[in-house]
Image (cartoon, rainbow, N blue to C red):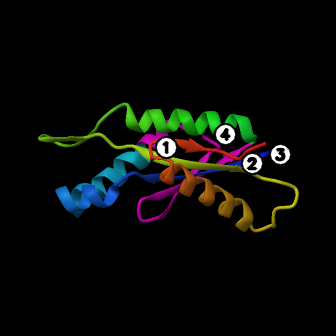
């Protein structure tokens, strides 16, 4: 069964915390998490990986489909503002790296996670608010 990972990161999250405070930053994480959960298939699993990073395990999903899903999520997050409170709506964007399981990957998923993370770094260095998947 094909398995893919999306590793995503909120663009400029430190600016949100520095500008509006950590309570607004925490609320942004909660709202983003809820938006992810409500827009994924029931058998796909999002996890907070650390700070403002999330990992989504896409079951039964190959390379091409996983990139399409990541693009859809990127638009889903960036196209509709997040209502923080009665006075504040925030536009949040994400960068995402996508990787799909290969036969040579280790059984713990470390190499798969590493490739998704490397693609996330490429997305961020290429300008953020984008998806980078595996070539080939």
Identify the magenta region.
35-59
The numbered disc on residue 37 is 1
Q: Nearer the viewer, residue 131 or 35?
A: 131
Mark 4 is surrounded, within 10 Å at the Cα level, by few (under 14), some (14 to 19) or many (20 or more) other residues, namely many
Q: Secondary structure at mark 2?
A: strand
> Mark 2 near mark 3, Cβ–Cβ under 8 Å?
yes
- State how far apart marks 4 and 1 are (Cα): 16 Å
Q: Nearer the viewer, mark 3 or mark 4?
A: 4
Residue carrying label 4:
66
Of callouts 1 and 2, which one flags the residue occurring earlier in the amino acid sequence? Answer: 2
- State how far apart marks 1 and 3 are (Cα): 22 Å
- State how far apart marks 1 and 2 are (Cα): 18 Å
Q: Residue at x 62, y 45 (%)?
A: 44
Residue 75: give x, y in percent of width and height.
46, 33
Mark 1 is surrounded, within 10 Å at the Cα level, by few (under 14), some (14 to 19) or many (20 or more) other residues, namely some
> Mark 1 near mark 3, Cβ–Cβ under 8 Å?
no
Q: Quadrant of residue 118?
A: bottom right
Of callouts 2 and 4, which one flags the residue occurring earlier in the amino acid sequence? Answer: 2
Q: Is residue 61 visible?
A: no
Residue 11: give x, y in percent of width and height.
39, 51
Left or right for 35, reference 16? right
Residue 54: give x, y in percent of width and height.
50, 56
> Mark 3 near mark 4, Cβ–Cβ under 8 Å?
no
Left or right for 71, reference 58? left
Residue carrying label 3:
1
């Amino acid at each position: 069964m094909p398995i893919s990972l999306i590793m995503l990161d909120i663009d400029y999250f430190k600016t949100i915390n520095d500008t509006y405070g950590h309570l607004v930053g925490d609320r942004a994480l909660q709202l983003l998490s809820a938006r992810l959960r409500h827009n994924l298939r029931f058998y796909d699993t999002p996890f907070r990986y650390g700070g403002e990073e999330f990992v989504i395990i896409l079951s039964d999903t190959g390379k091409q489909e996983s990139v399409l899903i990541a693009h859809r999520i990127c638009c889903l997050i960036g196209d509709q503002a997040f209502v923080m409170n009665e006075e504040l709506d925030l536009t949040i964007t994400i960068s995402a790296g996508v990787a799909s399981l290969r036969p040579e990957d280790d059984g713990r998923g470390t190499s798969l996670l590493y490739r998704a993370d490397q693609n996330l770094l490429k997305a961020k260095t290429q300008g953020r608010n984008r998806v980078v998947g595996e070539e080939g």
